[in-house]
Image: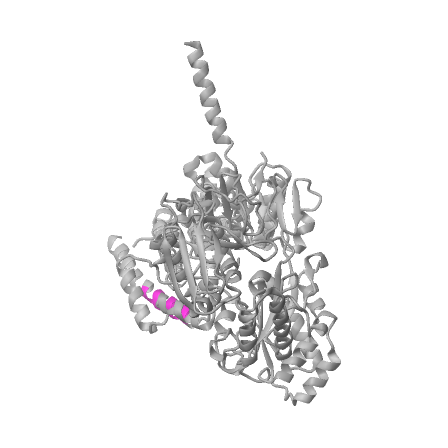
Amino acid sequence: MFNRLTAALLASTMMAGAAWAETTVTAVMHSGLRVLDPVITTAHITRDHAYMIYDVLIAQDAEFKPQPQMADWKVSDDQKTYVFTLRDGLKFHDGAPVTAADAVASLERWAKKDAGGQIIMDRTEKLEATDDKTVTWVLKEPFVPMLDVLSKQSALPPFIMPARVAATPPDQAITDYTGSGPFKFVDAEFQPGISVTYAKNTDYVPRSEPASWMAGGKVVNVDKVKWVNMPDIQTAVNALSGGEIDYIEQMQVDLIPLLEGDPNIAVEVREPTGMQTMARMNFLHPPFDNEKIRQAALKAISQESVLAAMIGNPTYYQICGALLGCGTPLGSETGAETLTKGASMDEAKALLKESGYDGTPVVLMAPTDMVALATQPVVISQMLRDAGFTVDMQPMDWQTLVTRRASQSAPAEGGWNMFITNWMVPEISNPISNPMLIGRGDSAWFGWPTDDTIEQLKADYIAAADPEAQKAVGEKIQAHAIQTVLEVPLGQYTLPQARRTTITEMLPSPVPVFWNLKKAE
Amino acid sequence: MIGYLLRRILAVIPVMLLVAVFVFLLLRLTPGDPAAIIAGDMATPAQLQAIREAMGLNQPIHIQFVTWLGQLARGDLGTSLISHTPVSGMIAARMGPTLSIALLTILLSVALAVPMGVLAAWRHRSAADYAVMTFSVLGFSVPVFVIGYLLILVFSLKLGWFPVQGFTPISAGPLPFLKNAILPALTLTTIYVALIARMTRANMLEVLGEDYIRTARAKGAPERTVLFRHALRNAAVPILTVIGTGFALLIGGVVVTETVFNIPGIGRLTVDAILARDYPVIQAMILLTSFLYVLVNLVIDLSYSFFDPRIRY
């Protein structure tokens, strides 16, 4: 009797111990999750969510190279047929096996929204599931960057969903969040904009290779991950100090001193590639419909001043004149010397005089509610004024800006001349998916340049036979884009992450991922 | 009384209709595009247009308005344009934290402020009076986020008595609830104590100068009876008004306090919806807040007759 009682007590103690041992990582991400469909939006938080619950056929590693993830691939000698073979053990969260038909339906839905996907589809002869495990993609002509596009990590990676979910029209949001990724979405605990919980997918079979960026083995070492949205970064810092949360994805640089000296907290750069900040001009209206005036504006701008005002601490920013990003395979700084070496006001003034600039005001939209975009317009306005421009900097909220930038009206009638935005470097590193390098007038990205040369250069890039040839075209793209001022690159920055030191082995990846990491009690 | 009540309830309908028209038009005239929030920065103009069409934002305004009114008549507040969750569910989930913090704040405020106001009036121009007035001025003047951060610094980070942030529903037990709710409620209490104590003091001072107070004292009524039965009851009407509107204000959302303490309440829901131009959520929130104001005012008006029997409806 006594033994039975002891055994029962021991068992219950062990069970209680097991319950206590459940490890949950509580993280404050850069924004609250509201949109759950990674095809309908390019929002980074939705992409990050998608990497938790979905998987991808092939993925980019830290060398920007495609690697097998759900599937291995073979390419025919004529480079027109790609055969992807799904690996064993892939299961959706509802228990159903992942089939080639699911992959085909997901790729078709993705390709209707993604610029790179559309280019591939234009060249596609057929995309089909040849059996349960094989996806065969036949092109009408070779498309060398095929695997780069399919493996890209941002902004719209081709996540694989069940075919019934992928049947949703691409402009309509999905309502079934069944994935096959390393975590499961806990629907009952989801509060849009407040918190989202992910539970470890115990059926997930990770690859055997070590994890590298989005590729390799996604080994989950915690039971749950909870993302909590805290709109006030000071509250997040207090919560991290108090041990109520484990991780802050993006620290505000001026709050870092509050955490320095705490032995329980580490502040670090997760991955140095980081973000690019850049300015875009409107090619439809004066004064920036004139190439010389655009060049004058570019010459007047110094990245150092912009980044110092924006980030402050040089540890967290990098002067970089490459439109396709520094530290990327195609990154080149050709033609951007004045930007990176402190502007050339004399050249700017001379160009402005030569252009016959008549004092038409530059309407510069300045979002005041976005910390990461608030300072650049102020600094740029002053530099443009110093060069002789008349600048009308108009403060507004980000929502007003995104509405107004879609307007092609003249600046005096609700249009605009210039705005600033930020990108993750990997998402602008490829000329095919970089929105600023679209030169098709009305169907280009906001600013609407008509530029046949850039379109031809992108075609040359697609046709380039090897990485060396691609690099050579990348150099020409950089030179041309700076010459015509398709954008003004303003430099790169990283917002460091902060974690409790109980969290270890976080992957250095541009997308914050929660596989691989461990949490000590 | 019942006739009055019915008339007041019927009067709510045109008020709410006017609010509905006003809110709807105001939102459509404000620049902003929920499709842009959904699509993200990389979307091209053509992709934005496709999303707008899928969301029904391209329909003429009058069609959108009639559709919304039809939904409202069926008791349907619509679905969030951003998260695609029903607005009624979102409000229900956020109402709990807001209501409980508001109730706790009002309870604490009344419990502290009314005796403070009475004391200040009773001991007019004494040290106690000056102390109450100084506290009131401070309560009004110090920004709410400063009080919040100070309380967090002392009671959470230094002493470790309370969590820094978050909310635990009362269903999890009164102690866990109080552990999370006490600091935000205290933060808000400083403002409301200041407001109610000043109002109580001013009205008590006026009433204490009345003839019937002198008569009560001349009759030998104990000071406690004079203060609380004769004076406070007669001074209660304006104090009640302040408490009522204060409560409505708290339910309408206290964004800064909710943000500082990371409370998923109504205030943050409204601000997030405004920033994302999530029209159905904003419309529902403004309608609800207006309705609450109307309701609270009605309750206050009815309660007047309880404290002052001269008031009859």
Q: Position of residue A500 (x, y in %)?
A: 62, 42
Q: Pick whichever, B128 or A267, lies toward us.
A: A267
Q: Which residue is at the front of the view, A132 or A11?
A: A132
Q: Residue furthest front?
A: A77
Q: Name the foreground residue: B23 vs A310.
A: A310
Indicate left or right for B13 with B264 as reference.
left
- In-front residue for pair A264/B45: B45
Above or below, A499 relative to A464: above
Left or right of A476 in this view: A171: left
Looking at this rendering, what residue extends furthest in the left direction? B3
Q: Position of residue A424 (x, y in %)?
A: 58, 61
Viewer can see residue B113:
no
Q: What range of the chain is rendered magenta?
A: B17-28
Q: Quadrant of the C terminus of chain B?
A: bottom left
Q: Looking at the image, what colour scheme do you see?
A: one colour
Residue A476 in percent (x, y) is at 63, 74
Residue pictured at 72% horizontal, 83% vertical: A349
Q: Is residue B19 magenta?
A: yes
Residue A469 among magenta residues: no
- Asked if one can make out residue B199 in the rendered structure from this viewpoint, the answer is yes
Residue A314: percent from the left, percent from the top? 72, 59
Q: Main secondary structure of the magenta part?
A: helix
